[in-house]
Amino acid sequence: MLGKHKIIALLTDFGLKESSVAAMKGTILGICPEAQIIDISHEIPLFDVRHGAFVLASAAPYFPKGTIFVGVVDPGVGTERRGIVVETENYLAVGPDNGLFSLLMDRERVRSVYEIRNEDLMLEKKTHTFHGLTIFSPVAAHLANGVEPRMVGPKIKNYIRWSIPKTMVKEGVIWGEIIHIDQFGNGITNITENDLEKIGVTYGSNIKIRIDGKRINSPFQKAYGCTKIGSYVCVIGSYDFLEISINQGNAAKKLGIKVGSKVKVERQIKIR
Amino acid sequence: MLGKHKIIALLTDFGLKESSVAAMKGTILGICPEAQIIDISHEIPLFDVRHGAFVLASAAPYFPKGTIFVGVVDPGVGTERRGIVVETENYLAVGPDNGLFSLLMDRERVRSVYEIRNEDLMLEKKTHTFHGLTIFSPVAAHLANGVEPRMVGPKIKNYIRWSIPKTMVKEGVIWGEIIHIDQFGNGITNITENDLEKIGVTYGSNIKIRIDGKRINSPFQKAYGCTKIGSYVCVIGSYDFLEISINQGNAAKKLGIKVGSKVKVERQIKIR
Amino acid sequence: MLGKHKIIALLTDFGLKESSVAAMKGTILGICPEAQIIDISHEIPLFDVRHGAFVLASAAPYFPKGTIFVGVVDPGVGTERRGIVVETENYLAVGPDNGLFSLLMDRERVRSVYEIRNEDLMLEKKTHTFHGLTIFSPVAAHLANGVEPRMVGPKIKNYIRWSIPKTMVKEGVIWGEIIHIDQFGNGITNITENDLEKIGVTYGSNIKIRIDGKRINSPFQKAYGCTKIGSYVCVIGSYDFLEISINQGNAAKKLGIKVGSKVKVERQIKIR
């Protein structure tokens, strides 16, 4: 499956203040010295599996076929929670069985999910607090070395998986919700360009949004910079979803919205 | 122009909490798998083009000939603002035409500046909010693959460029200003060692500084650690400019100075 | 000593907001283009040599034989403080002679320590404020190129070195102290699993801890997640030391402990 470029891309909530991520990298390079290690993010909010799943799924499609993702956002480390390898058409993903790869699976054709059981692929070490180091990193490195995914353990079906909630489009109204708030305070909804087309919204249209009891009117534009600084602007962002934004401002803070906030979107018809 | 080591060095204001930088890296590796990606910084203050220009120009001269810089501090993304490739004697730089490469151009012999127009070198993607991903990263990767800079689009002359203000040295006085404040609170001026020589200041001299209405006296030393902890010390820092510092302290905070603060420097003559 | 994979792993307190770390990387790649540069951490608390020593020693053992570490936590830069190269059985370490490699030396068999004097291996540059750039990075890159450690300068014996304080185990009581507090607020002690065995504590035991005048009871478990969220839990963490933790909480903040806090540990005997 892999060519000579063995990319292993890491996502954790460990931060870079301690040695955790470096220990993972050293372990990977000890097993697969040719690995090209890329950091996706180590600043996922602590234990926020959904946030991690979103960031991972957003970055993954840009990586070359054969990339191995290691994801460690893992509040259940050391408990009965299993470790898994997800094999999709293009990628492998290694990490805890807690839904962290759910959105990656939404974007990819999933081939198989394996439970990690093969102790020969793990690090010999007593600690039970850091499977990112003792299990997921060495397993990823062995996969990069050409070990077949089925060698890690048995195929399983009952892994944990959740999905982005679906929008509802009815009578010129889209009902959706906020699924992610990025560091700039953009509120990313689950609403697609296709949803907007169904209610007749195209670039340059104005839209009415109701969110958490607040009403805003905003142009739908190609880019944040298409309105004046400080004004609301809605765009299809790099996540391919409608974002509620303020040009050079923080929309999430101003509106007090959070992940899960319900969003109602209508086309604004000009009176005259 | 490039040898077998294809370094692509990235500077953005995206932070590392989201998937943006990782998506750029994945895109680069998809086009040029041999690329060696180096992070300059992703923590440039949001939309602060001048800060980004300073950090980029400070790091660049240490990189090997042939390095390709990708800079994305880009408040105007998605507007009429053009994308450019700057070709200097030693480097290529890819990013928005907003002055981000001005200081790099000050330090390098500039050969040509090209406007990016060739859509064959861009990512096919609908989003208009993230040219770092859809334009600058793929263009840089194609350049690393050996695409000639002139293939990106027409040569232009009317790109945006600004310069570090010049000092004035007259009658034993240097008039300068603060051009950067680093994370440690060192105030970096536009004053060079050459300026100091003109007014007779050498290592070990004491200097009088007037800045934003405040007066300080400070020794001019080789290193911060040459005075006692908590004392003012002026050094020629790694930026090759005079820095106003406090040993293990934060001079910018204590003095309340900021970028643009005017600085007057004189040699302090000892009375007896 | 080195194979074809030339890993240079960096640890500094510079942060990634400025150009310092990038300038170091560019310098390394200019001298040794094949170097594989890995970041251990650039977020060591400013000038906190002991914290840096702990993080470095925690990450190092996971790296392949032949890795070259560059450590720059260096309040004394530019003073008489020497630069050194430490040669251990498995690694080289380059940085200031201020104790930063003390704990690495505890974990490794030390062969020799050399003072860096050979100016041919340094960068020609006037600044005296940034030896990470002008001395340690180029020396590390030359070592990666195969320069023998003894070429950097004379062997020395009187380098600075300190050690983790030893525990005392007596009459069923372990006397130890906090040696590190990680970003999650886990208090890492100097107490080993071996110490605990001596007082009869095994996984599942309950232990009594007295620390800074406070008393807590906690189970000794394999992993944080083995108690309920918000409860104290003691584990042997990835540092191989006893950690005082709260599952998904911040023990250090709650207990008000800091590095140096004395810890008294006893096995808790159940009454009935």
Image (cartoon, coloured by chain):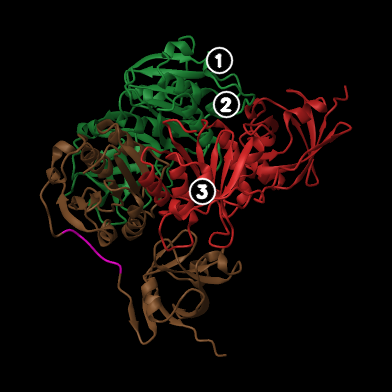
Chain colours: A green, B brown, C red
Q: What's the CA distance linking mark 2 and mark 3? A: 48 Å
Query: What chain does mark 3 sit on?
Result: C
Three-letter amino acid code of the residue under disc 2? Gly
In the visual, does B59 lie left or right of C218? left
Q: Using the image as rendered, state which of residue B123 and residue B36 is in the foreground.
A: B36
Residue that badge 1 annotates: A119
Q: Is residue B163 magenta?
A: yes
Q: Which mark is residue A101?
A: none
Residue that badge 3 annotates: C152
Q: Is residue A138 magenta?
A: no
User: Magenta residues?
Assistant: B159-164
Q: Using the image as rendered, state which of residue B30 and residue C245 is in the foreground.
A: B30
Q: Is residue B51 visible?
A: yes
User: How many other residues sit within 10 Å of disc 3, few (<14), some (14-19) or many (≥20)?
Assistant: many
Identify the secondary structure beneath mark 2. loop
Three-letter amino acid code of the residue under disc 1? Glu
In the visual, does B73 lie left or right of A261? left
For discs 2 and 3, the disc positioned in front in the rendered view: 3
Residue that badge 2 annotates: A76
- Marks 2 and 1 belong to one chain: yes
Residue C72 in picture, x, y percent from top left: 53, 50
